[in-house]
Image (cartoon, rainbow, N blue to C red):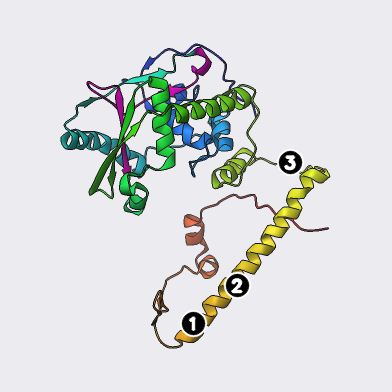
Amino acid sequence: MSSKKLTVQVRNNINTKNMTEEEWLEVRRYSIGGSDAGAILGFNKYESPFSLYQKKLYPELFEQDLSDNEFIYWGNTLEDIVAKEFERRTGKKVRRHNSMMYHKDPEYNFMSANVDRVVIGEKAILECKTASEYKREEWKDDNVPASYMAQCYHYLAVTGYERAYIAVLIGGNHFVWTTIERDEEIIESIMQTEKDFWDNHILKEIPPEADGSVATAETLNKLWQETTDNEVSFDDQQAAHFKALQAENKIIKEAKDRKMYHENKIKEMLGDSEVGASSQYRATWKPQTSIRLDTKRLKKERPELFDEYAKESKSRPLKVKEI
């Protein structure tokens, strides 16, 4: 695996108005952007410091066809609607800012910002978001998800602006907006964390330590799809992970057993009743029917049909046993 080395260079603002999605992503790879901030700070469940590092250095391994991604499509399509609704509700005016901006301080010139809108007559930006109905609680009482908070503070760091407005359309029918004022202490902390990530990982090509996130697991699986039949030896410090994994597996099994015990006791109490309730809880145990494809029978009786619709998937399961 060879990385496309990211070097220290002076970055000037870049006009993004006529850029394709691919061109924009390539430019963005050479800096730390607003959506990267949450990952570096550990606030983004879809991206970890480890996975972000690998995508910056080995982008060809993580290329995705996003043309059919409904979430991205509707997010982009509804951005203008969210901006217009923000204007209607606040009386403020906003405009697009078709530019990739960089921090003016040479020490932090690796920090970039591509904001959704700037607010006319204020030193402020507007970020436009969409969210599913399941995310409503995350936005309740002027709350903003941590990853988006990090993104806004990152943009304030790069632009030097005083505040960020963030507006979101939830479930297609619930609109909220709030204000994030500039906080020098928070901004300084974010800048230092990002600088450490850039200087000590990206520029030195030293990956951050793998963590326990799904994003890191998926990245490791992507990185090492091609294998050899070599065997490696681990020292005692490395082997401690084996012992820890076995201990965690035991805890999980015991927890599953305890969970099943309580489920079985509730079923025993319900008997033939479909519903049971206490002063605080309500339980249902109702019959339901599901249809599943009998793949073994299909393969045996209609092999040509099975072959036509079968989809091959590759995996690399990790198995650990004591010897």
Residue to which mark 2 is pinned: 258
Tell me which amino acid carries mark 1.
Lys
Instruction: Write the residue at 56% across / 36% down.
Output: 49
Front label number (1 vs 3): 1
Pick whichever, 294 or 302, lies toward us: 294
Q: Which residue is mark 1?
A: 267
Stretch in magenta: 106-130
Q: Disc 3 residue type? A: Thr
Which type of secondary structure does the marked residue at label 1 adopt? helix
Q: Is residue 263 magenta?
A: no
Q: Residue at x 44, y 14 (%)?
A: 104
Q: Based on the picture, tell me whether residue 117 belongs to the magenta stretch.
A: yes
Residue 231 seen in the figure: no
According to the picture, the residue beneath numbered tag 3 turns out to be 228
Q: Are marks 3 and 2 in contact (CB under 8 Å)?
A: no
* Horizontal arrangement in the rendering, residue 151 relative to residue 177 (left or right): right
Name above or below for residue 109 compared with residue 213. above
User: Is label 3 in a helix, a strand or a loop?
Assistant: loop
Depth-wise, is mark 3 or mark 2 nearer the camera?
Answer: 2
Do the residues under discs 2 and 1 have CB atoms within 8 angstroms? Answer: no
Q: CB of mark 1 within 8 Å of CB of mark 3?
A: no
- N-terminal of the pair, mark 1 or mark 3, is 3
